[in-house]
Image (cartoon, grey):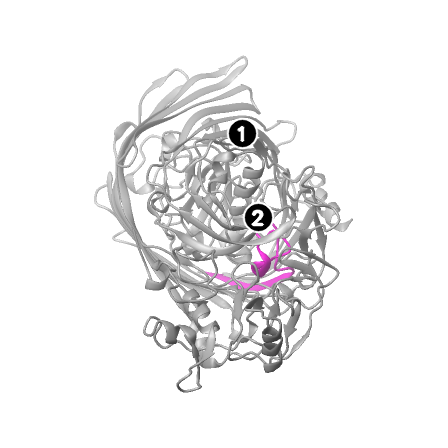
Amino acid sequence: MIRPILFASACSAALMAVPAYAQSAANASGETLPQDPQGDAGAVSAGSADIVVTGSRAIRDGSQAPTPVTVMAAEDLAKGQPGLIGEALNQLPSFRGSTRPAGAFTGAVGPQSGSYLNLRNLGVQRTLVLIDGRRAAPSSRDGSTDINLFPQELVKRVDIVTGGASAAYGSDAVAGVVNFVLDTRFTGIKATAQAGISDKGDAPTYKASITAGQSFAEGRGRIVASATYFEMGGIQSVGDRDWGRRGTGFLGNPAVPGQLIFRNDLRSSTASPGGLILSGPLAFQQFAPGGTLVPYSRGSAQSGLIQVGGDGAQVFSNLSADVTTRSYFGHAEFDVTPSLTLYAQGSLALARNHYNQAQQFNPGGFNGFTIFSGNAFLNPAVQQVLTDTNTPAFAMGRVNFDFGEPANATARARTLDLTAGFRFAGAGGLQIEGYFEHGRNRTNIRTYNNVALERLYAAADAVRDPATSQIVCRVALTNPGLYPGCVPINLFGAGAPSQAAIAYVEGASSYTTNFTQDVADLSLRAQPFSTWAGPVSIAAGGQYRRVALNQVADDIAQSINDATGIRGFPPAYQNQPGGWLLTNVFPVKGGYHLWEVFAEAAVPLARDLPFLHALDINGAVRYTNYSTSGGVTTWKAGMVWEPAAGVRLRGTASRDIRAPNVPELFAGIVQNTGSVIENGITVPIVQAARGNPSLQPEKADTYTAGIVLSPAFAPGLTLSVDYYSIDIAGIISSLTPQLTLNQCLAGATSLCANITRNTAGQITRIESPTLNLNRLATSGLDIELGYRPRGQVLGGAASVRFIASYLDKQRQDISNGPSIDRAGEVGLSANPRWSATGSLDWKSGPVELFVQERFIGAGTYDVTRVEPRTIENNRVKSVFYTDLTAAVRLKEGYRFFLTVNNLFDRAPPLAPNGTLFTFIPTNPLLYDVTGRQFTAGVNIKF
C-alpha cells in the first residue's frame, strides 16, 4: 500500500504548484514559454530571439494557444532521471512505445538502442523532433532523430505539443511535436559528473559534461560551447534478473487447441546443445559429448518449438544495450546592428551501441540439419543403426552454444549538424529569420559471429575422401571449387565443432548508411495591425528540403541462396535473398526533395466583455510539393475562449500529413529469422521486409478540445483536461509477421498472399512489404494538474505536478479484415488505458527533495485473443514505480545529488515478447527492466 499512498499524496493531497521554471510566466497548463528578460513588447531586438509558442509560428502568448503544450524544464527532468534526457521524457504518459537504451531490442537491421521518441504510440516516424524550432539532423537510416545525441547540458526546456502541427512545421507532425529549446545565451561555466549502478551490480552509467559561454564586443557577440560524454553498460542476459531467470512465457495448450498458456522454464523442443535427433529410428535421442546418444527429456508439455522443462536448450537474450555517446556543440551569434543578428551553430555526435542479437541456432523443422547416412563424424554405433534400418538421413536440431559468443551487433554512428542563419527585427514587431541547415549521419552496423548459410550446410555434410580417407565437405568432391576452403564441421555433441570449422561458417555481416538532409528556410512574423481586442499576429514563409540515403551492404547479405551441390539445405532459404542467418540488408539508394509555403494568423476578437473575457482564433495553411508524390495541403484552425477569468476553453481541428521516408520508399529486401504462433504452436519462419516506391503520404484528421481552470479561490492551482482524436488514413506501415498471420486468419485475405507454406502446410516465410494500410485512429484524454501554495510548507517551498493520460481508442483497420482496437493492450503493444506521472518537489535552504510516482495501468496481453484463440490468462497487472532524489548545495556553485529510480525494485509485469531465441518475459518498451538503480553526482556552476 506504500506506493499508492505516495502516488495519491504527491498528486492531490499536497496540492502544491507546478515546478517553477527559471524566468517562466505562470501557466501551469504548460503553455507559456519562459520570458526573455531582454525582450520588449514594443521593439524586440534581433538578438533577443522573440518567444514564439511551440506548435504555432504566429502566437507569442501561451494563453492564446489553442493546442495543448506541456513544458518540461530540463532541471525537473533531470530530477526524475539524471542519466539521459530521453529516458526522463519517456517517463511521461504521452510517450509510449519509444525506443530507448534501457529497453533496447534487435530488429532485422541490427540494434535499435538510441532514444527515439514515440508520442501516443503512433510510431517514431509520426513524432516530429525540433531543436529551437528547426528540424533536427537525422541520426538513423529512416531520418528519425536520436535525442541522446543532443547537447544535454544546454537543453533549457522541452515543449511537447500533443496534437497535429503539420501546418506549422510540415510533414511528420501527426502525433505531435517535441521541441528542444537550447540555452544558447548561457554565460559562465557549468559542469556535471555522475555515476550510477543498479542494486544488482550491473547497468553502470557514467556521465561527464562541461559547458562554457561568454559574451564579447560589449555584449554584441555571444558564444557557447558544450561537450558531453555518456556511457551505459548493458544487462547482458534476461537471466540476470529473478523475474527473467524463471524463463516464463507462453506456449500452446496441448489440451485446448488454439489456446496459449503461460508457464515457467520454457525451453526449445526441437534443439539441444549437442544435437537432438528428430526423425527416424533414433528420434528424440540427443548427442552427448563424444558423439554418443543419450535419451532426451521432452519435459512436461510441448508445443511447436517450445517445451516446459526437460533437456531443451534455454537461451537468454540481452536485456539492454551497451551505449556510449559523445556530443560536441557550439553556437555563436553577433549583432551586426541592433536589428540584424547573424548566427552559426554546429554539433557533432558519436555513438556506439552494442547488443547481443541471438545465440546461433538451428531448430528442427525450419533451418535444422539433415544428417545423411555416411556422415564421417557420426559415432559408429549410430551409423550402424542407420545402416541396419536402411535410414538414408535424419533431421537434427541444435543450439550452438559451442560456437562461442552469440551473434552480436555493434552500431557506430556519426552525426553532423551545421546551421547558419540570420534574424532581423523591424518596426511593428516584424521578425524575419532565415537559415540553411546541413545534417549528415553515417552509421555502420556490423554483426559478429553471424553464420553464413551456404557455408554452414556445406560444412555439415561431411564425408571421407575416397582418395585420401580424409574427412572433407562432400561438396568439395561433387562441386570442387564452388565453396573454396570448406572445413567440415562435427555437430555431434557439445564441444564437437573444431575452431577451424567454426571460423569457416561464421563471419561478420555489415552494412553502412549515409543519410543527408539539407534545409533552406525563410520565415517572417509580424503584428501589422490591431483590433480593439489586441494586436493581430501573422507568420508566413517557405522551405526547401532535400533528403538522400545511400546504403551499402556486404556481398553475402546481397547474395541469393542457390545452394548448388549442397544436400540438406533448408527449403525456406532456397533461392531466397540473404546469405546470413541474421541481419540481411540490401543496398538502398534514393531520396526526394520538396518545397513548401505556409501562412498563419492569430486574431484576438474580444477582451473583457461579459462571457467574453477573451476570445482568440488561429488559422494556418501549408502547401507542400514532394518530388515523389506531388502536392498536398495541410491546415489548422483553433480557438481559445475565456468566458470568465480563470476558465479557458480551447479547441483545434487540423489536417496533417506524413510523407514516406526513404527506406519506406526504396528499401530492398531486409531478411531475418523469427517465429510466429499458429493454432497455439510456435513455428519458425524467415521474415522479410521491403520498400514500396508507390507509397503516398498519410493524411490525418486531428481534433482537440479542452478546458483549463485557474480558480481565483486557489491561487497557483491550474487544472487542464484535453480530449484528442487522431484519425490517420493510408497509414504507411509493414505489419509484423505475427500480425500478418493474425489478420490473415481473421479474414484479411489480401495479406494471406504474403505467407509462404511448404508442401506440408507449415509456414516457412512471411513477407511484410511497406504499404498504405487502411486506417489508424486513436483518441483519449490528457490531464494535467499543478499547484503551488503561496506560503511555505514544512519550512520550505513545495510544488506538485500530476500528468495523466487515458487512452480510449487505438484502432487499426486493415483492407479486407476486421477492425482491431488495441487500447488497453500492454503485451504485444504499449497501449495502457491509464498511465500517469506525479511529482512532489520540496526545497528549503540548501536541501532539495524530489519524489516521483509513475503508474502504468493494468491491461490485456493480446486483444485479438478471443474464442477460440484464447489465452489462459490474458490480463497484465498494473505497476507503480517510485523515484527519489535528494540534493544539497554545500557551497556556492556546488550541488550534490543522489537519485534512486524504481526505489522499491518493482519487477515488470509478465508480458512475454520476442521469439524463442530473443525472448524477454515482459514488454521492454513499456516497463522498467533494470530494477532499482542508484545515481550520484555533482553539478558545478560558476
Q: Are marks 1 and 2 in contact (CB under 8 Å)?
A: no
241 sits to left or right of 130: right
Image coords of residue 151 (percent x, y): 40, 55
Q: Which residues are magenta?
A: 913-941
Which is more toward the observer, 585 or 548? 585
Q: Earlier in the sequence, mark 1 or mark 2?
A: 2
Type of amino acid at the residue the image marks with label 2: Gln
Q: Residue furthest left?
A: 336
Q: Quadrant of residue 13?
A: top right
Residue of label 2: 91
Q: Is residue 197 magenta?
A: no
Q: Quadrant of residue 710?
A: top right
Residue 516 in sight: no
110 sits to left or right of 76: left
Badge 2 marks a residue whose secondary structure is loop
Which is more toward the observer, 69 or 871? 871
Q: Residues within 10 Å of mark 1 (few under 14, many from 20)?
A: many
Type of amino acid at the residue the image marks with label 1: Tyr
Badge 1 marks a residue whose secondary structure is strand
Against 25, residue 106 (above or below) is below
Image coords of residue 719 (percent x, y): 61, 32
Residue of label 1: 724
